[in-house]
Image (spheres, grey):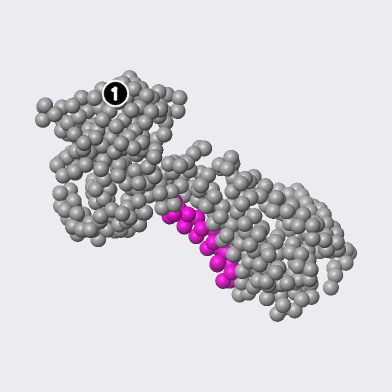
């Protein structure tokens, strides 16, 4: 069932309540509230119109171009967010997100959903968005943890080196910890799905008219893809980062 | 004497600062060398150059006739071992700490038969009771930790032991135990930095770093 523009306008009126609360508390958030929602509305309107267009075209190249824009955006956002070792970050991020994309997307589209045609944008684009968005966040966390795990305590690293450890052996404990930190919350979320909350994608599908049984299958598929994608991205990113972070004597470079 | 290490440095520097120039040294087996000099004279830089931990130098260093840069770094570092002032032991029991490097590929081809026997003998000469093996490292005192760090290195029979101020945080008794033990029992060569007067008297050879020059004195006639 579609929402009428009048109806959507009436939902905006709900914002009266937070505004009343802010004014009662003399909390200076009203400006930010208007700003945030205005941005959201404009951004979603633009994306909605663009996607409407792409979905209607059903063109392989146009779909691929849009996916390329998505991944570029993800790489640039990540690059802006990571404040260390900027010099080596770009190839690391491109390769990590690229590898994940090239494994997960064909797998899901060719083996699992099999839409006709395979590149149907209404499947490829939302799924890619979910995988990419999660991979991006997790990759930032994993790289941050890996770098701080090393640089907060170089002595530990140097002690391992001076006992005859190679680069891999000397960084493995930190690598493990970074992976654990970034993947644990994902696993906790996965384990709590359905019990605590209905995930966004499933809610959207059910509201859009799909049967709950179809919606849960999509949800399972998407959670699996996200977790696989996130693990791959984190792992690839740290492995590449590792190679660029150290010289051939395993000493950190580019401080 | 069998030549173990041959140091031919035209320049040793740190960032923009020149620390030493024209250092030509030969180190044989079973030598006991002490490096002295004021802070900033380049003692640690020189020491860490020898196990590839410092690349700020011009010239070459040969270990058993081969440029150290030609070795896989981990292999060289398992032959020329460094122990630092505050070694990191990690977590777990003393046994866990001693076992940690066993997984390293660089140690795969070592003869490690009777490693435990060697560890026990080392603990005895370092005056640590064997019961410490099952003790958690977090319960050890500073001096005990330092001795465990040394045993962790010595169990693999390195050719050269590099010691960077390992006794500076220790009391005289402990420092004495450590120097006696290394001095008497270690079959390889030792190159150490120390301010401890107790150590300074015992070493056969002293490398004094002063104003960019390394003065090499052998005290074998005194001993």
Q: Residue at x 15, y 33 (%)?
A: B202
Mark 1 falls on what kind of element? strand
Q: Main secondary structure of the magenta part?
A: helix
Task: Answer whether residue B64 is magenta in the image.
Answer: no
Q: Residue at x 33, y 19 (%)?
A: B211
Residue in front for this viewpoint, B165 or A193:
B165
Q: Residue at x 25, y 43 (%)?
A: B159
Q: Which residues are magenta?
A: A171-192
Compared across the picture, whether B104 is left or right of B143 comes to right
Q: Is residue A242 above or below residue A125?
A: above
Task: Answer whether residue A175 is magenta in the image.
Answer: yes
Residue A61 in the image: state x and y as whole percent: 79, 57
Q: Which residue is mark 1?
A: B214
**How many numbered circles are shown?**
1
Q: Is residue B10 above or below residue A134?
A: above
Q: Residue at x 84, y 73 (%)?
A: A1
Q: Is residue B12 above or below residue B30?
A: above
| Rendered-image quadrant of the C terminus of chain B | top left
Residue A172 in the image: state x and y as whole percent: 44, 54
Q: Residue furthest front?
A: B65
Residue B163 in the image: state x and y as whole percent: 27, 39
Residue in front for this viewpoint, A73 or A190:
A73
For the question of whether residue A149 can be seen, the reply is yes
For the question of whether residue B164 can be seen, the reply is no
Residue B51 in the image: state x and y as whole percent: 34, 39
Quarter of the image where one finds residue B57: top left
Quarter of the image where one finds residue A193: bottom right
Quarter of the image where one finds residue B48: top left
């Amino acid at each position: 069932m579609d929402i009428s523009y009048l109806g959507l306008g009436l939902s905006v009126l709900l914002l009266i309540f937070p505004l009343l609360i802010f004014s009662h508390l003399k909390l200076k958030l009203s400006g930010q509230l208007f700003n945030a929602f205005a941005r959201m509305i404009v951004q979603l309107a633009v994306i909605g119109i663009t996607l409407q267009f792409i979905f209607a075209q059903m063109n392989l190249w146009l779909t691929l171009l849009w996916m390329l824009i998505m991944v570029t955006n993800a790489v640039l956002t990540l690059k802006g967010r990571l404040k260390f070792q900027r010099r080596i970050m770009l190839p690391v991020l491109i390769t990590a997100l690229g590898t994940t994309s090239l494994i997960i997307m064909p797998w899901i589209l060719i083996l699992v959903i099999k839409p006709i045609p395979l590149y149907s944008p209404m499947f490829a684009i939302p799924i890619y968005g979910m995988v990419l968005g999660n991979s991006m966040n997790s990759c930032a966390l994993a790289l941050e943890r890996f770098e701080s795990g090393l640089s907060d305590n170089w002595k530990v690293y140097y002690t391992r080196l001076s006992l005859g450890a190679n680069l891999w052996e000397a960084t493995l404990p930190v690598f493990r910890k970074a992976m654990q930190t970034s993947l644990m919350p994902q696993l906790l979320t996965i384990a709590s799905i359905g019990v605590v909350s209905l995930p966004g994608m499933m809610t959207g599908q059910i509201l859009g008219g799909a049967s709950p049984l179809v919606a849960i299958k999509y949800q399972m598929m998407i959670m699996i893809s996200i977790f696989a994608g996130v693990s791959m991205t984190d792992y690839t990113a740290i492995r590449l980062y590792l190679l660029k972070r150290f010289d051939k004597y395993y000493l950190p470079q580019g401080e | 004497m069998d030549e173990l290490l041959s140091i031919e440095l035209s320049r040793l520097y740190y960032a923009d600062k020149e620390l030493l120039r024209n250092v030509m040294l030969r180190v044989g087996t079973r030598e006991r060398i002490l490096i002295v000099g004021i802070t900033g004279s380049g003692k640690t830089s020189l020491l860490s150059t020898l196990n590839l931990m410092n690349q700020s130098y011009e010239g070459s260093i040969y270990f058993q006739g081969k440029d150290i840069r030609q070795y896989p770094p981990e292999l060289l570092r398992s032959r020329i071992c460094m122990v630092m002032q505050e070694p990191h032991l990690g977590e777990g029991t003393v046994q866990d700490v001693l076992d940690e490097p066993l997984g390293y590929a660089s140690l795969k081809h070592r003869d490690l038969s009777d490693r435990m026997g060697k560890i026990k003998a080392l603990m005895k000469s370092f005056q640590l009771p064997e019961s410490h093996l099952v003790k958690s490292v977090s319960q050890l005192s500073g001096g005990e930790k330092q001795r465990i760090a040394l045993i962790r290195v010595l169990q693999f029979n390195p050719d050269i032991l590099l010691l960077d101020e390992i006794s500076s945080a220790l009391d005289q008794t402990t420092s004495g135990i450590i120097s006696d033990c290394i001095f008497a029992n270690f079959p390889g060569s030792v190159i150490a930095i120390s301010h401890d007067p107790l150590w300074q008297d015992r070493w056969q050879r002293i490398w004094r770093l002063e104003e960019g020059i390394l003065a090499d004195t052998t005290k074998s006639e005194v001993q």
